[in-house]
Image (cartoon, grey):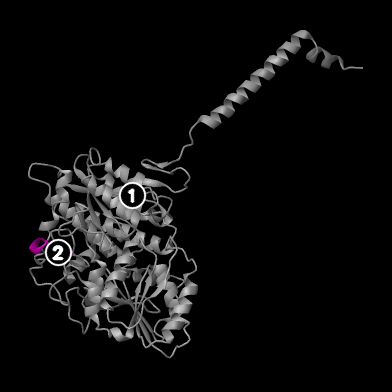
């Protein structure tokens, strides 16, 4: 027998109507909710000016408000930058952006990036607090191009939109790798009239020169690969008959391509054809090149060569060193000479440090080193090309930003030279901005900043912590000091300052006339 209550609720005509209406209402509400979920755009913002591009979990964009882009190591220095920026008055500052792949997945690149950000902030703090109240003040922002600089375009587009109020962007520094995406980014920025100061770019074709100006407004503080090769050649004469070149066969990497070309000239009389390897498309990947290096190490044992010039990125350099450490002819001694990518290996946990010193010497042309301009017993510093006073000023500023006065920004490691180079590059940007600011104006015109490079020489040179920066008419450093550094089982050891021209510049530090 049916339950009487059930009959009354569900089977009267009136209740059927009420129940049907209720079900329809619930279905309609559910449909609206589902459609809303489907049509409402996903919030991909990370912070003001920073968002995750479609298909990526990286936070990309520009921030000077303390955002660390999800990189814990940057948290302290990003906070310090934010606090310094907060002290600035609107309309009284010019902005400098530090353009870097802040979210790189490469451990060695992340270490380099941290040191560059710390060095750039040290210069910002000095410019705003220890420069006799010169104007304009400097606001620093971090600009992330993503892992491998894959998202450089939206970040560069954002920077191009910051040249007006309230940001007044007047220069971009960072620009740390000689890669195709970086080349495109520099092309876009300089084409829009933004001055660019490269930190660790060394490719010869990422420059301006006589009769060519692909990057108007670009300056660099690092020597080119050709200058590095010349400095290494002057540092220690190598018998080409006992030297061999090992280089990357993958084209399109401006660093390795130009370093290969420079080393090839030095070894024009070598009796040995170069030994080739092909790195992965992303040279930070391990790939299978370790297998190739095992074979190359075996072949080297059969030659009379005792010096190897290596043109490749740091991951492949580390694999090559490890392979030489396991060579069959351990009774044979080898010296490996390479470019500034060697600076990455000082903190690389996968480097076989036992191989170093056991008949294997690895030396590289560094961009800077903390011992280069420090007095030490038995070593006389060059009279020109740099100074102990400039380096000590840098150390004093580091002490300020490492403590409560302006930081702390975390421990600052100097042995890889990255903090020194970033500090000097930021100094070039700051001086250009201030020299371009005409009397009666609070800020320089955008296009005037990149016009300052030809006068940044002679007595108007930048006295950098890593040595004098005497720019030629095309924004390239003339006869810049090149510290030769040796990898050891402990930490990189400074050997000697070398010079592209074989000797330090004169006190004038005036680049010679070019055709």
429 lies above or below 265:
above
Quarter-wise, where is residue 111 in the image? bottom left
Q: State the residue at coordinates (27%, 52%).
A: 186
Task: Identify residue for label 2.
Answer: 470
Can see residue 426? yes
Q: On the rendered image, what quadrant is the C terminus found in?
A: bottom left
Q: Secondary structure at mark 2?
A: loop
Assess whether residue 461 is covered by the magenta stretch: yes
* First reached walking from the N terminus: tag 1 or tag 2: 1
Q: Which residues are magenta?
A: 457-463
Depth check, front residue: 144 or 63:
144
Depth check, front residue: 418 or 279:
279
- Between the residue at mark 1 and the residue at mark 2, the CA separation in whole angstroms equals 27 Å
Q: Secondary structure at mark 1?
A: strand
Residue 147 % position (x, y): 41, 54
**Total numbered badges shown on the rendered structure:** 2
């Amino acid at each position: 027998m049916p339950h009487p209550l059930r009959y009354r609720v569900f089977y009267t005509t009136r209740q059927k109507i009420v129940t049907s209406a209720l079900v329809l209402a619930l279905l309609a509400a559910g449909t609206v909710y589902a459609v809303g979920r489907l049509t409402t755009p996903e919030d991909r913002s990370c912070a003001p000016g920073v968002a995750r591009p479609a298909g990526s979990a990286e936070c990309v964009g520009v921030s000077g408000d303390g955002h660390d882009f999800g990189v814990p190591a940057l948290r302290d220095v990003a906070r310090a930058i934010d606090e310094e920026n907060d002290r600035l008055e609107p309309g009284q500052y010019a902005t400098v952006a530090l353009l870097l792949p802040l979210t790189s997945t490469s451990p060695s690149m992340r270490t380099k990036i941290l040191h560059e950000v710390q060095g750039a902030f040290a210069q910002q703090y000095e410019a705003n607090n220890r420069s006799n109240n010169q104007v304009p003040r400097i606001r620093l922002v971090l600009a992330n191009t993503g892992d491998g600089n894959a998202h450089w375009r939206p970040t560069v587009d954002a920077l191009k939109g910051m040249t007006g109020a309230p940001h007044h962007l007047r220069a971009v520094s960072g620009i740390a790798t000689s890669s195709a995406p970086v080349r495109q980014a520099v092309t876009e920025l300089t084409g829009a009239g933004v001055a660019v100061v490269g930190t660790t770019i060394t490719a010869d074709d990422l420059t301006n020169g006589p009769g060519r100006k692909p990057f108007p407004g670009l300056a660099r503080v690092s020597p080119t690969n050709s200058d590095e090769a010349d400095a290494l050649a002057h540092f220690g004469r190598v018998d080409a008959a006992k030297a061999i070149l090992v280089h990357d066969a993958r084209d399109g990497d401006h660093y390795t391509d130009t370093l290969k070309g420079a080393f090839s000239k030095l070894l024009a009389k070598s009796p040995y054809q170069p030994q080739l390897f092909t790195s992965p498309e992303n040279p930070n990947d391990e790939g299978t090149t370790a297998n190739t290096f095992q074979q190359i190490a075996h072949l080297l044992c059969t030659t009379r060569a005792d010096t190897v010039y290596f043109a490749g990125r740091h991951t492949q350099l580390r694999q090559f060193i490890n392979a030489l450490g396991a060579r069959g002819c351990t009774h044979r001694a080898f010296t490996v000479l390479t470019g500034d990518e060697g600076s990455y290996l000082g903190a690389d946990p996968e480097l076989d440090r036992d191989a170093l010193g056991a008949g294997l010497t690895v030396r590289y042309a560094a961009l800077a080193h903390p011992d280069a301009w420090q007095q030490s017993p038995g070593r006389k510093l060059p009279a020109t090309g740099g100074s102990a006073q400039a380096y000590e000023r840098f150390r004093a500023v580091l002490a300020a930003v490492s403590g409560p006065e302006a930081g702390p920004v975390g421990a600052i490691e100097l042995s890889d030279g990255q903090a020194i180079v970033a500090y000097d590059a930021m100094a070039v940007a700051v001086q250009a901005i201030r020299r371009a600011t005409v009397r009666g104006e609070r800020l320089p015109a955008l296009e005037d900043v990149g016009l300052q490079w030809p006068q940044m020489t002679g007595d108007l040179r930048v006295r950098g912590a890593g040595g004098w920066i005497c720019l030629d008419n095309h924004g390239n450093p003339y006869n810049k000091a090149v510290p030769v550094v040796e990898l050891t089982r402990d930490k990189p050891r400074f050997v000697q300052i070398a010079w592209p021209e074989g000797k330090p510049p004169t006190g004038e530090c005036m680049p010679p006339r070019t055709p």
